[in-house]
Amino acid sequence: MKRLFKSLFVVTTCAVLALAVVGCGEKKEEKKAEAPAAAAPAPAGPKTIIFASDATYPPMQFMNEQKEISGFEVDVIKAAAEKGGFKAEFKNVAWDGIFAGLASGKYDAISSSVSITDERKATMDFSDPIMPIEQMLVVGIKDKATDLAGLKGKSIGAQIGTTSYFVVKDVKGFKAIKTYDEVGLAMEDLVKGSIQGVVADSPVAVEYTTKKYADKIKIVATLKSDKVENIGIAVKKGNKEVLDLVNKGLAAIKADGTFDKIKAAHKMQ
């Protein structure tokens, strides 16, 4: 009887242990966490266009007292950006090399009183014209010269790489044709007497002869050309996206009178 009881005890104990082992071996099925739903992409904002400007060319582009790029053309582009649906940012870039920077993609466009010429159109694209300009001859306040011929045997200056320089570079009879990185430096030399004439775009010539050096220099001639000289925004060849946005904005501000208001505010002729 004891043996039977003992056998039953052993069998029962083994069964319990077997169940325990099976129970320990079971894995609880864990519920996998659901992946969060993918967030909807944020709507794209307006395209930012970076404009290079040589901010040494008042009243078109210059650094104001707050060390910000300011001027007539800057205000035109800001207004065009608002109407054209893009954001405009400006980068101060020296004129010497400004076109190379555009070609290499350092910025999207040039807003720097760039004259639209056939030579430039061969390597870059241009917006619709912003406005026409002329080339003007500036001399000392007491100088009797009334044209380029009156400066024969004397020295004349212009900013390098500009249409102002191209006007005089092949003219014979000057003592010297001096080039400058900035038009303001040429005007300073004219005031000091180091040169006797400066050729500059009409807005710039008016700015220096009526404001900064009104009692020292004067405009004596408008240098006629067989073509109307317009300034516009230059973009890399084939950059239609930027060109279309700029043209859209320019057309809008000219149609609604904003452009004329900006001209009046800057006292542009």
Image: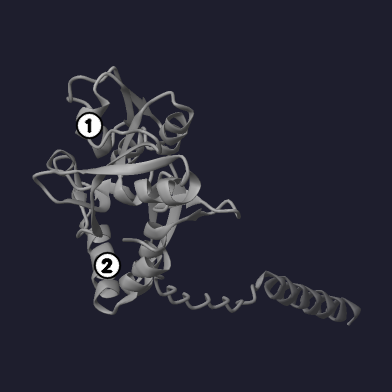
Q: Is residue 38 left or right of residue 168?
A: right
Camera-side residue: 187 or 260? Answer: 187
Q: Is residue 100 left or right of residue 66?
A: left
- Residue 151: image quadrant is top left
Mark 1: amino acid: Leu
> Is residue 256 placed above or below 68 in the rendered structure?
below
> Is residue 98 placed above or below 17 in the rendered structure?
above
Query: How busy is the neighbourhood of tag 1: few (under 14 within 10 Å), some, or many (20 plus)?
Result: many
> Is residue 268 placed above or below 40 in the rendered structure?
above
Q: CA distance from mark 2 to mark 1?
A: 36 Å
Camera-side residue: 109 or 24? Answer: 109
User: Residue 46: horizontal and vertical position, in percent?
Assistant: 38, 69
Name the residue at the right extreme.
2
Task: Say whether marks 2 and 1 touch (CB < 8 Å).
Answer: no
Which circle marks residue 148 in the picture?
1
Q: Is residue 77 left or right of residue 230?
A: right
Q: What is the image's colouring?
A: one colour
Q: Residue at image x 10%, y 47%? A: 227
Provide the residue designation for mark 2: 250
User: Residue 102: horizontal and vertical position, in percent?
Assistant: 31, 42
| Quadrant including the C terminus | bottom left
Q: Is residue 4 left or right of residue 139?
A: right
Q: Residue at image x 35%, y 38%? A: 98
- Residue 264: image quadrant is bottom left
Mark 2: amino acid: Leu
**Label 1: which secondary element:** helix
Please say whether residue 105 is visible from this viewpoint. Answer: no
**Label 2: which secondary element:** helix
Mark before the other along the chain sequence, 2 or 1 = 1
How many numbered callouts? Answer: 2
Camera-side residue: 102 or 147? Answer: 147
Query: How busy is the neighbourhood of tag 2: few (under 14 within 10 Å), some, or many (20 plus)?
Result: many
